[in-house]
Image (cartoon, rainbow, N blue to C red):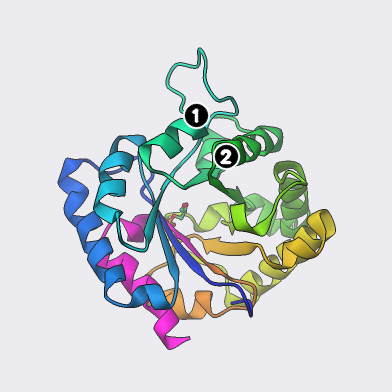
């Protein structure tokens, strides 16, 4: 946690969810309507097919909706892509950019992520910029260098805290059940905080830095209580309302 920064618990459904999953979205809405919103901001980043329906379910609730990627351009001949403006039109207010699965599956580079973050702002969205080292990089003790390179290349210098979130996601911790130690998370987030301040000045002290990678209700208190951890980006455990709410409930104990 960071004094003065309101935490954000964000879910990322990745390529999961159909009409049959709308019950979980209702469950998340009801959970946050029953007082959890006093502790934490909430967000669900959904496949594009569910954004409009989820925005309607979350209407009047404290839960925001986000997309999982956007194109750098506002429109054009880009089959299969989606613009930030289109996500906003569908009801999204956030978008994830540079998730490691996009970097791996689609060869996205830091310069691409930089363009997508600017596109997010142009479209009226908050950009969640993802960074994180692979297992090989961790074993080579290269984590600080990787984070410096990724944030330096991905973060536009015009970033402001109201529309920028950083997510630290060690690639080896995503979907594996493995997590770094609290001490490792503390070191990585302190490094990212220092880089943010170096890159954008005092504003960097106000930007939320989320931790992502195998966050569950059982480890949420330990991970979310770490200095400079301002929330979570949750994959698998966000698919079930009870698990996602269980993670957010950690803030009642911190
Ligand atoms: O965006 C979310 C992350 O990739 C974490 O996924 P996970 O919670 O399934 O490990």
Residue 245 lies in the magenta-colored region: yes
The reply to whether residue 228 is in sight is yes
User: Circle 1 sits in a helix, a strand or a loop, which is it?
Assistant: loop
Residue 15 lies in the magenta-colored region: no
Q: Quadrant of ligand 1?
A: bottom left
Q: Residues within 10 Å of mark 1 (few under 14, many from 20)?
A: many
Distance of label 2 from label 1 (alpha carbons): 8 Å
Residue farthest along the bottom direction in this orientation: 253
Identify residue for label 1: 83
Q: Residues within 10 Å of mark 2 (few under 14, many from 20)?
A: many
Q: Which mark is residue 120?
A: 2
Question: What range is drawn magenta here?
Answer: 232-254
The quadrant holding residue 250 is bottom left
The quadrant holding residue 119 is top right
The quadrant holding residue 204 is bottom right
Task: Give the percent coordinates (x, y) of residue 95.
Answer: 50, 44
Which of the pair 119/223 is nearer the observer?
119
The reply to whether residue 165 is in sight is no
Q: Earlier in the sequence, mark 2 or mark 1?
A: 1
Which of the pair 105/142 is nearer the observer?
105
User: Circle 2 sits in a helix, a strand or a loop, which is it?
Assistant: helix
Residue depicted at 26% across the width and 60% down the height = 240
Q: Vertically, is 252 above or below 146?
A: below
Magenta segment main secondary structure: helix
Q: Vertically, is 137 above or below 224?
A: above
Residue depicted at 23% across the width and 67% down the height = 30
Task: Give the percent coordinates (x, y) of residue 143.
Answer: 71, 58
Disc 1: residue Cβ within 8 A of ligand 1's nearest atom: no
């Amino acid at each position: 946690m960071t004094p003065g920064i309101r935490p954000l618990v964000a879910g990322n459904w990745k390529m999961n969810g159909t009409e049959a999953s709308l019950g979980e979205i209702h469950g998340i809405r009801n959970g946050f309507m029953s007082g959890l919103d006093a502790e934490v901001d909430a967000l669900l980043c959904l496949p594009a097919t569910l954004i409009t329906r989820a925005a309607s379910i979350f209407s009047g609730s404290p839960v925001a909706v986000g997309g999982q990627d956007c194109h750098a351009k506002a429109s054009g001949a880009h089959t299969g892509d989606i613009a930030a403006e289109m996500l906003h039109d569908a009801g999204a207010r956030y978008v994830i950019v540079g998730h490691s699965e996009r970097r791996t599956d689609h060869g996205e580079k830091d310069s691409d992520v930089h363009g997508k973050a600017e596109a997010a702002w142009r479209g009226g969205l908050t950009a969640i910029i993802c960074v994180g080292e692979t297992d090989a990089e961790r074993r080579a003790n290269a984590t600080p260098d990787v984070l410096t390179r990724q944030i330096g290349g991905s973060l536009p210098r015009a970033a402001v805290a109201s529309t920028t979130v950083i997510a630290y996601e060690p690639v080896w911790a995503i979907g594996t059940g493995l997590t770094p130690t609290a001490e490792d998370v503390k070191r990585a987030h302190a490094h990212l905080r220092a880089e943010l301040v170096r890159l954008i000045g005092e504003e960097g002290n106000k930007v939320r830095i989320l931790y992502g990678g195998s966050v569950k209700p059982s480890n949420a208190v330990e991970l979310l209580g770490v200095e400079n951890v301002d929330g979570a980006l949750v994959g698998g455990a966000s698919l079930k309302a009870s698990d996602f709410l269980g993670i957010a409930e950690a803030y009642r104990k911190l």
